[in-house]
Image: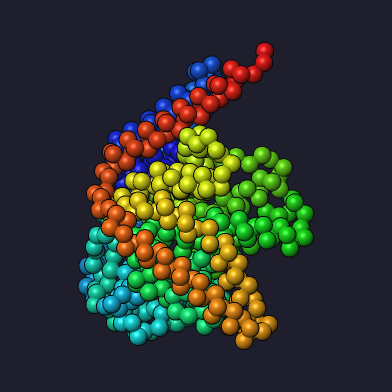
Amino acid sequence: MAFFCGVVGWYYGVFFGMVVLSCVMFFLIRYELFVDFLVWSKWRVVFIFLVMSFGFACGLVRSGWVTMRHEDAVRGVIARGVVELEGSLSNDPKVASLGQRVMVDIGGVGDVEISVPNGVELWRGDSVRMRGKIVEDVRYEVKYLKMQPVKILSVGEPVGFFGMLTSVRRYFVVRMQALFPESVGAFMVGILAGGERGLSEEVKGDFRRTGLSHILAVSGYNVSLLLQLGVAVIPVRRKWRFAVFGFLLLVFIGFVGFQASAVRAAIMGFLGVWAASLGRVKDMTLILLWSGFAMVLWDPTMLLFDKGFQLSFFATVGVMYVSPVVMRWFPDKKSGLIESFVGTLAVYIALLPVTMSFGKLPLIGLITNLLFVWFIPIAMTIGSGVFVLSFLVYPVAFVFARGVSMFVSWYFFAIHFFSWLPFSVFEVPPMSKYVVVGYYVLLAWWVCRSERAVVSVITSQRPD
């Protein structure tokens, strides 16, 4: 946590970072998350203070080193005017009326957004050589780079191990879109491998306005299914599972394109398997923090500027900590509908500042998530089954896929109906950084106080 505060301190000011660190220390002491803190010797208190200070300093140093190296490279490229650069596509092209928009990862410079005509065939992982002028722009209060105008000089297919996985994903996408028509095929690909390639703008807009965009992102659910399948079909001793499943998770996140939600879920899954292999009790709080630490250590900008990372991280926080507190509001805790509603509400509470940073608040999502998310496991099973069946009896798989497409089309129609409602989305201003900190301080206080109250009640009811 001190490292995270150091990252915040670099980008928003050391004083602001120290304020955040002070809030963290307050909760650690006030709610006895440091066990027996008040009875520790002064030397142990000093030791903890030094450790937290060291973590804070590491966050500052790591962020500063990454930022200065990046800014030097960016200033050099901008100053050169029209340049020729080469990089790899870090996502699938997003098709718009004026052309495709795609991010190109250029070594030393970072992601650069380019726009190319719709007729150019580009895939995630392709290497692209291009000519144009690099400029800075701002979107959602975050600076990013773009090249304009762009001339594509050459396009090459990916190479290496992860390039092979990218090629496999490309084959998977093409085959699924051949089996299922238009947006239905893209939907099947999205829930299995992530991404929005092939989805019409209307369908993507409907998913955004109804708060269902997370369906098209690979998350912990996909990783948990993968691990369950691995346990069922791979005969390996428990002490070696972390190595086998670690490689399996590496292949999976390479296949889906290193999406932030997938990487976070894969790291958490690996740490959980590792703890089980060592015979230790899994502490989900530590697993979540170590997962976030590994990702932010690699790229400190994720913590404050990567919306995918923020959505994934705080959604997990909502499920783990806010959901149990909200559940106490409902007497009938065995109802599946109540559990689904509580889970959705908890995630909305945890994600409120992140959601508002987009300028829109899809409140209808509290209803649509209850009505539509249940279909996703069924659709994933059907999509996987049709893909495997296509290698055995392609005509049967094709006919079956077309029949399933009729039901998915009705699914899209129902989502479109809710997105059409006038109260589905509200325009809201983004929260300031001080309001965001205040919001999460109050949220943490509410959760910690509720948990402590429950523990006190349980303790008082124990017989002497």
Q: Is residue 73 above or below residue 392?
A: above
Q: Locate the N terminus by quadrant.
A: top left
Residue 55: image quadrant is: top left
- Residue 81 appears in the rendering: yes
**Rendering coords of residue 217 (x, y %):** 47, 62
Say which residue appears at 34% left-offset and 62% top-offset. 419
Say which residue appears at 51% left-offset and 44% top-offset. 338
Q: Nearer the viewer, residue 40 or 233?
A: 233
Side of 311 relative to 180 (left or right): left
**Rendering coords of residue 404 (x, y %):** 55, 74
Task: Count up the numbered dots.
Answer: 0
Q: Nearer the viewer, residue 438 or 89?
A: 438
Side of 95 relative to 47 (left or right): left
Residue 417: image quadrant is: bottom left
**Rendering coords of residue 201 (x, y %):** 34, 72
Side of 361 relative to 270 (left or right): left
Q: How is the image coloured?
A: rainbow
Q: Is residue 201 above or below residue 331?
A: below
Q: Locate the C terminus by quadrant.
A: top right
Please identify the residue farthest to the top as the structure is shown: 464
Residue 398: image quadrant is: bottom right
- Residue 67 appears in the rendering: no
Say which residue appears at 66% left-offset and 39% top-offset. 281
Say which residue appears at 37% left-offset and 38% top-offset. 440
**Rendering coords of residue 159 (x, y %):** 52, 77
